[in-house]
Image (cartoon, helix red, strand yellow):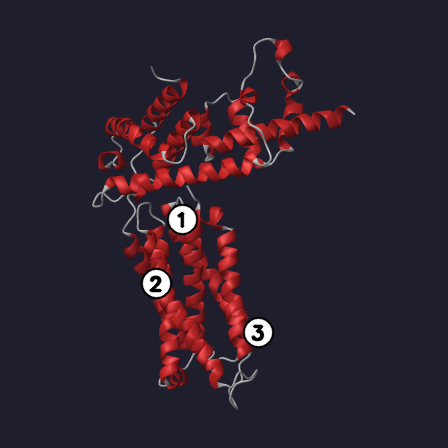
Amino acid sequence: MRAAQSGDRAAYEKLLGEISPLIRALVRRHCSNRADIEDMVQDTLLTLHRVRHTYDPGRPFCPWLAAIAWRRSIDALRRRIRVSKYEIANQGVYETFSDAAANSDLEGVRSAEEVEDLLQLLPPRQRDALQALKLKQMTLAEASLASGQSVAALKVNTHRALKRLRMLLEARKR
Amino acid sequence: MQTDKAMQTDKVIQSLAAQLQPVRRLRSPLLRALLWLAVIGAVAGLLIAHAVGVGVFLQRVAVPRVAVETAATGLTAITAVIAAFELSVPGHSPRWAVLPVLPLLTWLGASGLGCLANGLGLHGAAGFSGDSSHCFAFITGVSVPLAVALFWMLRRARPIDPLPVAALGTLGVAATAAFLLQFFHPFDVTVIDLALHLAAIALVVVVGTAWRRPLLAAA
């Protein structure tokens, strides 16, 4: 970790690879769903990256890492409880199908100006999530790094953004 | 066999390593807390020396109850600020949050005794009636620049759990303002004074805590 703080990329990659199983074991205490566990692992790694400057080499590494993993697990659980009260997960909204007939009306919008107009009507976090995942075609992890939102928050905000855009489109058609 | 998700995690690791830049390590939280306290103490000391006569203040703290109250206010400020810096770093004991509890209770108790000394009256002893609304304005007004300076330093840590950091930080800031008030408002506290002091402190804590994520650039 000390080497990573100095910018040693090989050491950093080795460290992250070695601690991933430990993080997985830590977050498994709070969650049994395999997909959610991996999201929490990725969120923990992203958070570790953001706060790597706070690690003191004079102190043990594991408590520092465990605190980050625990915090991200708790945040994910709280978010899951909050979201599940009002929404149902739909993995399909993250997919874009090659068959045009399978695409929604939303994805049929062609005009760049119309897309831009619609995007400006969204709350900032929803807009950022949609732009990153759908327009810039980033992976969830890349979008999380770029936007500062957790992987789970990106999924929720993308889902909400698409829902709102559908409502706006329907309102425009009337 | 690796799942898609596990492969995605590997890609995250490669991506993070590829974009790694060296970082300037954060100094010890205790050192940073003491630095903030030293700077604020120095600035406040200069202001008090130039703007206010300390004679009346020294007269007041000759009374044991007032000395205890003043010391407890100062200790609440110091311990709350130290606790905020400690908790801003992952892996530091959550017990730091307990550090300001005893000074805070002592402060509240001593202030309450001050009200009792006035017979729970709405006005202080003859010639020493306080102006409660000015106290409220002083605590909230002075808390603003103190909070700006404190959150500017705390942001560097990008706390992963910003709630206790913000709550303790704003408690420290409000207690510092209340401590400084002693020099500009050397009167016994009445019931109304105490209520407004507490309201001002609560307002500072609630506002600072509500804005914790953007103010602290939480990770």
Q: Residue placed at 38% from the left, 51% from the top?
A: B154
Q: Quadrant of residue B6?
A: top left
Residue pointed to by mark 1: B155
Q: A151 or A173: nearer the eye?
A: A151
Q: Upstream in the sequence, badge 1 or badge 2?
A: 2
Task: Give the left or right position of residue A158, taking residue B14 as reference.
Answer: right
Q: Secondary structure under badge 1?
A: helix
Which chain is mark 1 on?
B
Q: Residue furthest left?
A: A58
Separation of residues labelled 3 and 2 (CA atoms): 27 Å
Which residue does the numbered mark 2 point to in the structure image? B79
- Whether residue A172 is situated above or below residue B91 in the rendered picture: above
Query: Which of these two is toward me, A39 or B74?
Result: A39
Query: Please, is residue B195 above or below residue A85 in the view?
Result: below
Residue that mark 3 sits on:
B133
Q: Residue at x 48, y 31 (%)?
A: A152
Identify the element where label 2 is drawn: helix
Q: CA distance from mark 1 to mark 2?
A: 19 Å
The chain carrying label 3 is B
Q: Amino acid at mark 3?
A: Ser
Q: Quadrant of the N terminus of chain B?
A: top left
Q: CA distance from mark 3 to mark 1?
A: 32 Å
Callout 2: few (<14), some (14-19), or many (20+) C-alpha neighbours within 10 Å? Answer: many
Left or right of B212 on screen, residue A71: left
